[in-house]
Amino acid sequence: MKKIVILDFGSQYTQVIARRIRECQVFSEILPHTTPASRLRHPDVRGIILSGGPASVYAHKAPHPDPAIFDLGVPVLGICYGMQLMAHHLGGRVSPGGKREYGHGTLQRASGCALFSGLTRTLKVWNSHGDKLTRFPKGFRSVARTENSEYAAIEHRGRRLFGLQFHPEVNHTPRGREIIENFVHRICGCDRSWTMRSYIQLACEQIRGQVGGEKVILGLSGGVDSCVAAALLHKAIGNQLTCVFVNNGLLRKNEGDAVCQLVRRNFKVRLKYVEATGRFLDALRGVTDPERKRKIIGREFIRVFEQTTEQLSGSHRFLAQGTLYPDVIESVSIGNNPAALIKSHHNVGGLPKRMKFKLVEPLRQLFKDEVRKVGEQLGLPREVVWRQPFPGPGLAVRCLGDITREKLRILRDADWVVLDEMKRSNWYYKVWQSFAVLLPVKSVGVMGDERTYEFTIALRAVESQDAMTADWVRLPEDLLARISSRIINEVKGVNRVVYDITSKPPGTIEWE
């Protein structure tokens, strides 16, 4: 499959670059910046992008690529720090800027550069850098400038090497998507072959090649990811798949019955229900650290699956999961990735090192919106495909602090009110996610002329495309008022409701 490879130098926008390329219907893959050029010398690799990053090219332990990538003969585009790396390795000079350049800027471009084909001479762009290029390498020319940089874009036409000091991938660069399209299609020569229909065919072939005639067990939660994974696996291997629904005691109100009904109504798969509430809550007793919670839940899931397979007929060597690309990116540092670990996803960072299963992850290369498209292609109903995401660790990461049955009861009841009101008001399918969080905070209130000292519920509603970035939703005041009133009146143990107006970044969507 033809693809564009992105070498990651720790930019907060690396995943956005990958998404922009896929929006061009071209497959993109993020690899660590340490990837050797020999691995990229492949006919499927049609272009390389060097991401931005927080370092300075001259700093001690600054991340650098294998210099041989510039001699592979494929187009290379350096963005921000990536441009500075290219210039540095090819004989240019990078210096601290006399004035830092953050935020909006105006780009004046020259003529003749394929990156800017079809664009106006003046463009609005988004900058985020302190260092800048002060001398470009031999054979290069400047093709654009900003108020603070005369070398805001450079090219070596013969070697098809390009550099941009600004960020074309972000929405703040209004015509940046066209710049990326020019690189991907016009310069790299990629066609528009990355579609979810083609992906389904490829994924089925890969699944059959990986598992052969062996049996596969899938942890089905009823969420979008696991349901789509189940449908895709069933299409690929049929009755070799068995789905297991584990009630870990961290589900939403009436979730167990609802998921079983949903699966039996919409799927032709084997389903086994496992009641494991006591086991999980015992393991989590007294634990307050979010990372420990995730790892405990991941460990217990594996142990439950291992024990369950002993009760099933035949040997199940493979464990399937609905792991997505953002889960992988946020959970682990790829290679020596200079980007910081954000959190462990229980599918990725929370799994024990020793387990008897081999993993099958058919959605591992997809973003959330791509997963929904796969679900639609597979004929899954709207209530499945467009269901709001629910975290793998469940309510454990929405019940801050230690977890008790009483706190979970409060959180379930409050969350049910949130979802009920979102659906009644037709806001449920308009937002990415909406839910309640139980804070480990009690405050004084007054109810029925009596003093109360009870818990606080935080409401969270965000809009997003892929969960990599998100913004809080401006819900109508009357809707917020109804949710707050119902929670305080209907949920025993709560006397205060607050609304989270934090975007991602700096916050994450979930609170833990």
Image (spheres, rainbow, N blue to C red):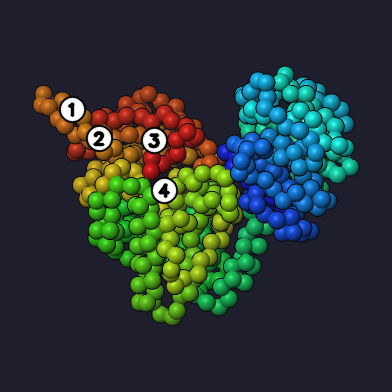
The residue where tag 3 is placed is: 460
The residue where tag 2 is placed is: 441
Query: Which is more N-terminal, label 1 or label 3?
Result: 1
Q: Position of residue 435 (x, y in %)?
A: 37, 40
CA distance separating discs 2 and 3 = 17 Å
CA distance separating discs 3 and 4 = 13 Å
Q: Please identify the quadrant where the C terminus is shown.
A: top left
Residue 191 placement, left or right of 228: right
Number of marks in the rendered image:
4
CA distance separating discs 2 and 4 = 24 Å
Mark 2 Cα-neighbour bin, 10 Å: few <14, some 14–19, many ≥20? few
Asked if 463 appears above or below 19 in the picture, the reply is above
Q: Amino acid at mark 2?
A: Val
Pair 1/4: label in front: 1
The residue where tag 1 is placed is: 444
Asked if 129 appears above or below 191 in the picture, the reply is above
Q: Amino acid at mark 1?
A: Val
